[in-house]
Image (spheres, helix red, strand yellow):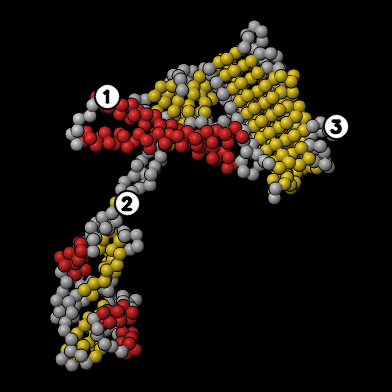
Amino acid sequence: MTNGYFQLVHKEDGTYIKFIPTKIDEQSFSIGELMDYLNFRDIAFDIKELNRAMLDCKEETEYKLNAQVTKAFRGSYSFRMSEDKMQVVLRFYASSVGGPQMTVEEVISDLRNRNIRYGINSDKIIEAIQNQIYCIDIVVAKGKEPRHGEDARIEYMFQTDRKAKPDVREDGSVDFLSLNTICHVKEGDLLARLIEADLGEDGMNVLGEVLKPRTVKRDHLKFGKNIQLSEDRTEIYSMVNGHVTLTGDKVFVSNVLEVENVDLSTGNIDYNGGICVRGNVFSGLSVKATGDIEIRGVVEGALIESGGNISIARGMNGMGKGKLVAKGNVISKFLENAEVHAGAFISTESILHCKVHAGSEIEVTGKKGFITGGNVMASNKITVKTLGSPMGASTVVEVGINPVLKREQMDLQKILQEANKVLASIEPVIAATIQKKRQGIEVPQEQMEHIQKLIETRTQKKDEIAEASIRLEELDNILVEGQNPCVVVTGEVFPGTKICIMDVSKVIKDSMKYCRFIRSQGDVKMTAI
């Protein structure tokens, strides 16, 4: 043995304490521990003399505690369980010289009486008693930590970032022909792979109480037409040549319709997929697509409506009746006399007398980079080089929370509330019927058919809750991003321009340059960029 310990010795002239010194640098027990041991057994001692004797002990020696003649004490131990109930530590103490030793069975029985049910290491106890290991902490029981699992996740094999922006040339102009917004796929291409949730494993503390791992999120692949699901439901493949997009968490593959121009020879176009117009779109016509719309020429007073992104390489003159509507982004050389709505961001070199609304940001950059006339609104940020006009054209820019997304958030919360209410009403009915079946009570066929419909309703409502919860989380992140809206002017803002930030507004009275407008203390404030 290398550790030091102490042992009581009973003689005819009194009670002694024998010190067995340690063979290592530091003593394995303290004067406090020794005092507690003696006080518990009502053995009198002089603390100063005891402390001196203990410190002076360099070899095995005996020190007389008192003149009382006492009986021998059997071996013992102290018990300590960690606060998290994951570990039990024992410290064994030697019996009096000639006194009875503790047995392994006695220690294990005592642990059982203390409700220690899991992780007892009997080998440690045997080793401590057989080798007389005293005054050292010995871990005799350990719990098992739960193994936490991982959320399910989906790996996409294509570019999912729908915020691709046009390249900016060295001279500051924007190359609207290099948009790279379409992700092409071939038949048989792997599109996405589901990595299923790892549920983890239960743990257990030394009292035998089960410790559950954290709850993980499950998921499944969501997709539209022209996509094949593997037999194990973990992979999806393209069934056609075309392009792939990710809308929300749903994968779409569609063919791309290409036309030279949209004019009287083609009529209106309404296509389930993406559209590429190599030329122009003329006034009075409409182009609608569930996917991206790419127009390499100009757009006149037409309606362009896309379930993805809209890109117009040479710009749009709406003639007061043209309209662009995109669930994703709008990228155009210029926008003039048109109405534009984008679910995400808008990027252009100029906006002239337009009504514009973007779900996230608006960037008006390039050589011109001006917003003149009309009403321009973005949820998060507007960046522009020149704002307003020295001629006093009425120009209003607004930034703040997207009202469309806010309304969608409220609708989803209502769906969750109603679905949970339905579940609360049908769960007891289903549970009661199942209980009857288990008890052998016959349930009429008509009632069983009704229960089957309730089970189908329960599944449907749970799916609704899962989908609504995922979308609500996405909306929460979007709305949080919009909590610090601003207008950034990299050039000059002219007098007469009205700037609205959430619920406050400001009309610019004097020309300003290189500034940022934010909402501060209930007012619109100007700061330097």
**Lateral position of residue 181 relative to residue 32, left or right:** right
Three-letter amino acid code of the residue under disc 3:
Met
Q: CA distance from mark 3 to mark 1?
A: 79 Å
- Of the residues tagged 3 and 1, which is closer to the observer? 1
Query: Do callouts 3 and 1 mark residues in contact (Cβ within 8 Å)?
Result: no
The residue pinned by badge 1 equals 446
Element type where label 3 sits in the image: loop
Spot occupied by residue 509 in the image (x, y as percentages of width and height): 82, 41
Work out whether mark 3 precedes mark 1 in sequence or the reverse, and give the earlier one: 3
Residue for point 29% across, 36% down:
431
- Of the residues tagged 2 and 1, which is closer to the observer? 1
Q: CA distance from mark 2 to mark 1?
A: 43 Å
The residue pinned by badge 3 equals 391
Q: Residues within 10 Å of mark 2 (few under 14, many from 20)?
A: some
Spot occupied by residue 458 in the image (x, y as percentages of width and height): 36, 31
Spot occupied by residue 344 in the image (x, y as percentages of width and height): 61, 32
The residue pinned by badge 2 equals 211
Q: Is the residue 83 above or below the residue 14 in the image?
A: above
Spot occupied by residue 369 in the image (x, y as percentages of width and height): 75, 32
Residue for point 71% across, 42% down:
504
